[in-house]
């Protein structure tokens, strides 16, 4: 607290990201990074961009990246917005598109940055409980009538959801979007490349649908900070208005060069996603053998609990062995561990350690 702070800053509860500890030989399975590196072509493009060009500002409109993404997804460049990580894209969306008189609806167990942005931008919110099996219940997101509280001002959810990993089928997403023509529906697909079906296929049909992706997970470029949104040109223009009132150059020259090269290397992208999916399936089977209940995952992490062992204690015991996973001290999920899919060898180390801990 400081008397120099604004009233808004006094009232904030900031987001706390997973830790990035500096421990030797750490098995780091806590922040959903990709276990293998990015496309070598992306790395080469980044290296090439480190020349004299850095003297100059980057392209404020990121035209090359928007074109590459538009081509990749079969949309027009004016349907693409890019930002400094998908967190920045989400932040602009909260201010530009999700803030209305009616409440913003999102799941109670979800990406914990959403309530933080509500606090920062003064967005009225309603958190809707997930079903007992941790799925998003489509019926809960359909308007009940026209009265106060019966309709959402806007809707946001991750698909697959985080931290549960549970996936909603595209038909279910479409039911929510189609039933809410007066509200923007933002589908945060940070993890969709690990087995989900993207709602980008629906953006030409629904002017109220905005789909947000990131280069941090499936493209193994968390350190580069690139995210994007695809939707109707009017939604994109709303985001551009906020961006151009905030920072003209959110993506630097290295990020633009690396991101374009990553998008152009489709074969590498597909192969590296498949590798993570294969490791996930092996890890799920091994955790189940150890007695864990593992929620079905469409992401690069699994959410698992053991019927006989406390979640926080398991996380602490792993940490003592230099293996870090994410544990949330929140209602309904405090017995779960969220485990990022690592390399095969990291996952084997984890399974071995859990076997020893459970035998204690
Ligand atoms: N959405 C979800 C659901 C996430 O889990 C994350 C990662 N913390 C993000 C968005 C943001 O990712 P980034 O800013 O790295 O693109």
Image (cartoon, grey):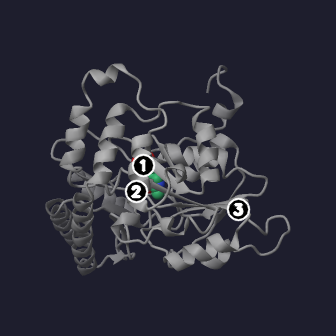
Asked if disc 1 and disc 2 are in contact, CB closer than 8 Å, the reply is yes
Residue drawn at x 44%, y 47% is 66
Helix, strand or loop at mark 3: loop
Residue 304 position in % (x across, y down): 36, 70
Q: Judge whether 120 appears above or below 143 on screen.
A: above
Q: Are marks 1 and 3 in contact (CB under 8 Å)?
A: no
Q: Position of residue 204 (x, y in %)?
A: 57, 65
Q: Is residue 54 above or below residue 179?
A: above
Disc 2 element: helix
**Marks 1 and 3, Cα distance to the nearest angstrom?**
28 Å
- Screen quadrant of the C terminus: bottom left
Q: Position of residue 274 (x, y in %)?
A: 24, 68
The residue closer to the viewer here, 27 or 279, is 279
For disc 2, does the CB lie below 8 Å from ligand 1?
Answer: no
For the point 21% across and 34% down, the residue is: 47
> In terms of secondary structure, where does tag 1 sit?
helix
The answer to which of 331 and 212 lies nearer the viewer is 212
Q: Residues within 10 Å of mark 2 (few under 14, many from 20)?
A: some
Front-most of 192 and 248?
Answer: 248
Which quadrant would the N terminus be assigned to in this image? top right
Where does label 3 land, which residue? 183
Asked if residue 216 lies left or right of residue 103, the reply is left
Report the residue at 47% width, 50% height from top: 228
Residue tagged by mark 1? 67
Residue 151 against residue 254 in the figure, above or below = below
Indicate which disc, 2 or 3, sits on the residue closer to the N terminus: 2
Q: Nearer the viewer, mark 1 or mark 3?
A: 1
Inter-mark Cα distance, 1 to 2: 6 Å
Q: Which mark is residue 71?
A: 2
In the figure, 5 relative to 44: above or below? Answer: above
């Amino acid at each position: 607290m400081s008397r120099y702070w604004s009233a808004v800053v006094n009232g904030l509860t900031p987001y706390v990201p997973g830790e990035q500890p500096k421990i030797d030989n750490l098995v780091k399975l806590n922040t959903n990074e990709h276990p293998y590196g990015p496309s070598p072509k992306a790395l080469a493009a980044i290296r090439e961009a480190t020349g004299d060009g850095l003297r100059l500002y980057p392209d404020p409109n990121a035209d090359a990246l928007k074109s590459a993404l538009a081509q990749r997804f079969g949309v027009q460049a004016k349907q693409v917005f890019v930002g400094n990580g998908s967190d920045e894209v989400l932040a602009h969306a909260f201010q530009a598109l999700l803030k209305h008189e009616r409440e913003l609806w999102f799941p109670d167990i979800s990406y914990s940055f959403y309530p933080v942005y509500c606090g920062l931008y003064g967005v009225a919110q309603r958190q809707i409980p997930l079903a007992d099996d941790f799925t998003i219940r489509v019926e809960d997101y359909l308007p009940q009538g026209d009265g106060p509280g019966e309709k959402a001002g806007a809707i946001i959810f991750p698909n697959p959801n985080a931290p549960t990993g549970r996936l909603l089928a595209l038909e279910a997403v479409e039911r929510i979007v189609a039933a809410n023509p007066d509200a923007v529906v933002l589908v945060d697909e940070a993890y969709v490349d690990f087995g989900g079906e993207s709602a980008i296929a629906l953006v030409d049909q629904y002017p109220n649908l905005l789909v947000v992706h990131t280069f941090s997970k499936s493209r193994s470029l968390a350190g580069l900070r690139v995210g994007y949104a695809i939707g109707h040109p009017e939604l994109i223009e709303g985001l551009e208005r906020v961006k151009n009132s905030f920072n003209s150059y959110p993506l630097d020259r290295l990020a633009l060069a690396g991101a374009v090269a990553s998008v152009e290397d489709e074969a590498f992208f597909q192969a590296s996603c498949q590798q993570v999916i294969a490791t996930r399936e092996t890890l799920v089977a091994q955790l189940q053998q150890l007695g864990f209940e593992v929620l079905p995952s469409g992401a690069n992490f699994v959410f698992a609990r053991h019927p006989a062992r406390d979640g926080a204690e398991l996380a602490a015991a792993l940490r003592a062995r230099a293996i870090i996973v994410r544990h949330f001290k929140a209602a309904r999920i405090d017995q779960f561990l969220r485990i990022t899919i690592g390399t095969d060898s990291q996952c084997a180390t984890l399974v071995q350690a859990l076997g020893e801990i459970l035998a204690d």
